[in-house]
Image (cartoon, rainbow, N blue to C red):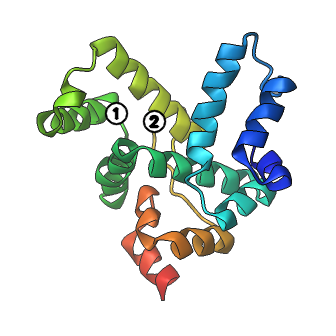
Amino acid sequence: MAKLFEELGDWEAVRERVMDDNLLRMRTPSASKRIFWEVTGRLKHLTPAQLALLRTGTRQEQGHLLWLAICKRYRFIYDFAVEVVREKFIRLDFDLSYDAYDVFFNNKAEWHPEVEGVAESTRKKLRQVLFKMMREANLLTQDNQILPAMPTPREIEVITADSPSYLLAFPVSPTEIQEWLS
């Protein structure tokens, strides 16, 4: 979809092409529509430079930029990345347990009543999807060990040009961030 957007320059035109040609290979139009809106909802949060790197970058760069798009779209996930994942990484505690997520979720529920009303089954599904996304971004192993992000100079450039605070969404040390920003 990022490549189509580069070609067409308009998300509505991208939607038409994706739906007309069933580019997502979904069985039903409603499934295609749902997936399209979810993916473009994330991609729209990337800057033009980030989208360009997403299209042309390495698999690692693409994974990191998709993780960034998710963090920019969902504040809850950004907060989890910063407050739990990054903090554990800095403390050299690389084990990311489901319990750590559950504690974070419960703490957020105390401050946000809309979170508190989420059904237990939905909470578990959200946790499962979040951990899967982290694995796909190569930030988490299959046995839930946090992996250090090693962004390339191109990634650092497009992320910091947007906002240096987005570097906090990745398991990196404060020293590395200081070096990148100087």
- Quarter residue 80 falls in: top left
- Provide the residue designation for mark 2: 144
Across and down, in percent, residue 94 comes to 39, 47
Q: CA distance from mark 2 to mark 1?
A: 7 Å
Q: Which residue is mark 1?
A: 97
The answer to whether any part of residue 147 appears in the image is yes
Secondary structure of residue under mark 2: loop
| Position of residue 6 in the picture relative to residue 178 (left or right) | right
87 lies left or right of 125: left
The amino acid marked with disc number 1 is: Ser
Q: Position of residue 19 (x, y in %)?
A: 78, 26
| Residue 30 location, quadrant | top right
Considering only order in the chain, which callout, 1 or 2, is on the residue closer to the N terminus? 1
Count of picture labels: 2
**Is 63 placed left or right of 102 in the picture?**
right
Residue 138 x/y as whole percent: 59, 46
Could you say which is closer to the camera, residue 8 or residue 124?
Answer: 8
Q: Residues within 10 Å of mark 2 (few under 14, many from 20)?
A: some
Residue type of the residue flagged with mark 2: Asn
